Amino acid sequence: MDKKTLYDSFTQIELDTDATLHQISKIKKEVETLVEENATLRIENQHLRDRLSDLEKQQRSDEEVVEPEMSKSRLNLEKLYEDGFHVCNVFYGSRRVNDEPCAFCLDVIYGERR
């Protein structure tokens, strides 16, 4: 090989190396951008999952609160009724024969709450 060919080869290798280095730098910048975007999306995704979880908890608690709880006195009447006694003002304290249902008692226990 003569000196000119050797010099031209080195020049060509240098140009190829510079082009490759430029491509590598360009790809590196794109990867950095993608990594930043990925991190941002992960954080946003976690915030959305947390928000969704909060909304689901709130919805469950709202569904539980929909039916108001009975007062202690009505709970006591309900227990007496389940034990087989009338709690209505018509038959109060008498035994329910064969645990038959009583519309008056049910109205006293579960009727409209004022």
Image (cartoon, rainbow, N blue to C red):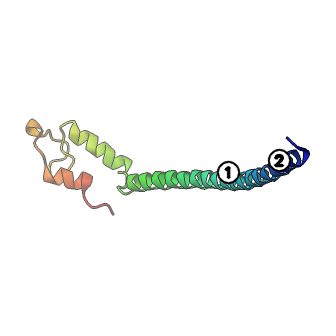
Among all residues in the image, which is located at the extreme right? 3
Q: Is residue 89 visible?
A: no
In this view, 106 is above or below 97:
below
| Residue 56 at x, y percent in the picture | 46, 53
Is 3 on the left or on the right of 55, as rendered? right
Q: Residues within 10 Å of mark 1 (few under 14, many from 20)?
A: few
Q: Nearer the viewer, residue 89 or 14?
A: 14
Whichever of callouts 1 and 2 sits on the residue coming sooner in the sequence is: 2
Q: Residue shown at 57%/53% (left/top)? A: 45
Would you say the residues marked 1 and 2 are in contact, meaning their CB atoms lie under 8 Å apart?
A: no
Marks 1 and 2 sit apart, C-alpha to C-alpha, by 38 Å
Where does the C terminus fall, quadrant-wise? bottom left
Residue type of the residue flagged with mark 1: Val
Say which residue label 2 marks. 9
Q: Which residue is mark 1?
A: 35
Question: Depth check: 44 or 4 in front?
Answer: 4
| Label 1 residue SS | helix
Question: Is 54 or 86 nearer to us in this picture?
Answer: 54
Quick one: quadrant of the N terminus? top right
* Quadrant housing residue 47: bottom right
Q: Name the residue at 58% across, 50% down.
A: 46
Which kind of residue does numbered mark 2 sit on?
Ser
Q: Is 79 above or below relative to 31?
A: above
Q: Which mark is residue 54?
A: none
Q: Point out the frontmost of discs 1 and 2.
A: 2
Q: Residue at x 66, y 54 (%)?
A: 34
Residue 28 position, x and y percent, is 73, 51
Element type at marker 2? Answer: helix
Residue 9: give x, y in percent of width and height: 82, 47
List the single residue furthest toward the front. Answer: 2
Residue 22 visible to an observer of this rendering: yes
